[in-house]
Image: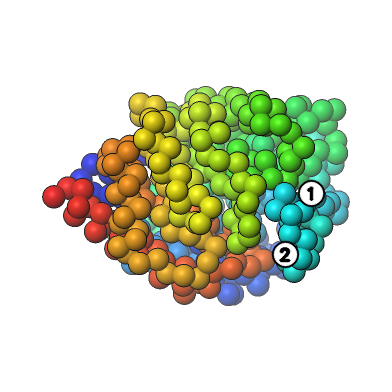
């Protein structure tokens, strides 16, 4: 994983706006149809996404998750064992506090729907989809010079289990282990292709507000410590410096008044093997948490990837504010240990995003300009 040794590098969290012609295809896709035609469309979208990232000034780019319907349940189309109707996962703590807010959320009143449940044995049925995404990103980078590095995001075992509940295996622990064993193949293929692997682990923070809202803090910490153990086992053969981890508190514009403080979980997160740690640090609920790194120092070899752009609003952050946020983290963790990122993805689901596509790209341009300003201040 590249480090900011001469200037602050920029990246994002993975999902980026998809073109309208691909969105329509993804929303209607059920796994049937012309696979070759769909693959060509995804490859074209990845090429366009990479080009736009580089035009915006992003250094560490991805495929934008163009071919995935969302960031966590995409594996339902690639693995056997998933089916049936979605179930309600239950409301979040803040939805319980503000029922009028919850009722106003389209499709979310009473809790968000999950993906399909696990109802049979899990095995790969379409690993070609992983390989095609990798090949398409390679081809796009070959045609567009300027990227410092490429990364590919993949769901963590517990995050997948979180939104696709177990209805088949004898225990949730067994289910988690089977998922881990299957996903290891995807993880290793991404790194073998020369890309950085990003492991999407929102469960390490946001599950406090819904699935685990009945737990005490010590119980929650014990649960996510186990999640980290399973994750570490799945990536035990991958060098730490070839991986980064993303955690968040839920990529939605809402109260977030029960979000677990970063200070309460950061030690558990630091036990994960990936060298890079991506987290929300721009939105109004978490922008103050840079201060914890005054006395909680990242372990040797860790790189912080704080979000300095909010991914849930259509405000375009001023580059000077972005630079200010970057410099704060550089002051407490060291400039070489910081890569500027976004709070979360701009298109975590093909069903829609609160940020308009043109504004998302404007926000990324502001991220790049803010990093330039920060670099001038930090390397003067």
> Visible in this render: residue 138?
no
Asked if residue 314 is positioned above or below residue 195 in the image, the reply reads below
Mark 1: which secondary structure? loop
When asked about the image quadrant of residue 172, the answer is top right
Q: Residue at x 76, y 27 (%)?
A: 174
| Mark 2 vs mark 1: in front | 2
Q: Locate residue 161 relative to residue 359 in the image: left or right.
A: right
Query: Which quadrant of the figure contains the N terminus?
Result: top left
Q: How many marks?
A: 2
Which residue extends farthest left? 380
Q: Locate residue 356 relative to residue 380 in the image: left or right.
A: right
Which circle's residue, 2 or 1, is located before the other in the chain? Answer: 1
Question: Label 1: how many residues lie within 10 Å, few (<14), some (14-19) or many (20+)?
Answer: some
Q: Position of residue 335 (x, y in %)?
A: 27, 42
When asked about the image quadrant of residue 353, the answer is bottom right
Asked if residue 379 is positioned above or below residue 140 in the image, the reply reads above
Residue 199 circle label? none
Q: Nearer the viewer, residue 126 or 24?
A: 24
Instruction: Please name the colour scheme applied to the rendered image.
Output: rainbow
Q: Position of residue 319 (x, y in %)?
A: 32, 64
Q: Nearer the viewer, residue 214 or 195?
A: 214
When asked about the image quadrant of residue 98, the answer is bottom right
Q: Position of residue 158 (x, y in %)?
A: 67, 37
- The residue wearing badge 1 is 89
Q: Residue at x 30, y 43 (%)?
A: 330
- The residue wearing badge 2 is 101
Question: Label 2: how many residues lie within 10 Å, few (<14), some (14-19) or many (20+)?
Answer: some
Marks 2 and 1, how far apart in space? 17 Å
Mark 2: which secondary structure? helix
Q: Position of residue 254 (x, y in %)?
A: 63, 60
Q: Locate residue 352 relative to residue 45 in the image: left or right.
A: right
Q: Residue at x 79, y 42 (%)?
A: 165
């Amino acid at each position: 994983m590249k480090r900011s040794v001469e200037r602050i590098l920029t990246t994002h969290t993975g999902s980026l706006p998809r073109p309208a012609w691909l969105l329509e295809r993804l929303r209607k896709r059920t796994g049937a149809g012309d696979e070759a035609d769909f693959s060509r469309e995804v490859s074209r979208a990845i090429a366009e996404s990479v080009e736009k990232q580089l035009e915006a000034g992003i250094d560490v780019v991805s495929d934008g998750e163009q071919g995935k319907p969302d960031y966590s349940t995409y594996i339902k189309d690639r693995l056997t064992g998933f089916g049936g109707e979605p179930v309600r996962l239950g409301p979040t703590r803040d939805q319980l506090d503000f029922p009028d807010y919850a009722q106003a959320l389209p499709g979310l009143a009473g809790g968000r729907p999950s993906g399909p449940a696990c109802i049979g044995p899990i095995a790969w049925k379409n690993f070609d989809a992983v390989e095609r995404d990798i090949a398409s990103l390679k081809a796009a980078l070959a045609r567009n010079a300027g990227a410092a590095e490429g990364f590919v995001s993949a769901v963590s075992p517990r995050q997948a289990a979180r939104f696709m509940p177990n209805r088949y295996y004898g225990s949730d622990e067994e289910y988690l282990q089977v998922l881990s064993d299957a996903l290891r193949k995807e993880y290793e293929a991404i790194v073998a292709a020369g890309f950085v692997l990003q492991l999407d682990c929102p469960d390490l923070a946001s599950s406090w507000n819904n699935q685990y809202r009945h737990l005490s803090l010590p119980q929650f910490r014990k649960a996510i410590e186990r999640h980290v153990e399973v994750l570490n086992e799945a990536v035990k053969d991958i060098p730490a410096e070839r991986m980064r981890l993303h955690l968040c508190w839920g990529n939605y514009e809402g109260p977030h008044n029960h979000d677990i403080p970063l200070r309460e979980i950061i030690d558990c997160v630091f036990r994960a093997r990936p060298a890079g740690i991506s987290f929300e640090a721009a939105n109004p609920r978490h922008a103050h948490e840079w201060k914890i790194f005054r006395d909680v120092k990242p372990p040797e070899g860790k790189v912080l990837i704080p979000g300095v752009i909010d991914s849930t609003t259509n405000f375009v952050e001023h580059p000077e504010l972005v630079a200010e946020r970057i410099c704060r983290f550089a002051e407490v963790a060291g400039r070489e240990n910081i890569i500027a990122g976004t709070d979360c993805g701009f298109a975590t689901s093909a069903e829609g995003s609160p940020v308009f596509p043109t504004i998302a790209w404007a926000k990324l341009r502001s991220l790049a300009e803010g990093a330039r300003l920060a670099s001038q201040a930090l390397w003067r």
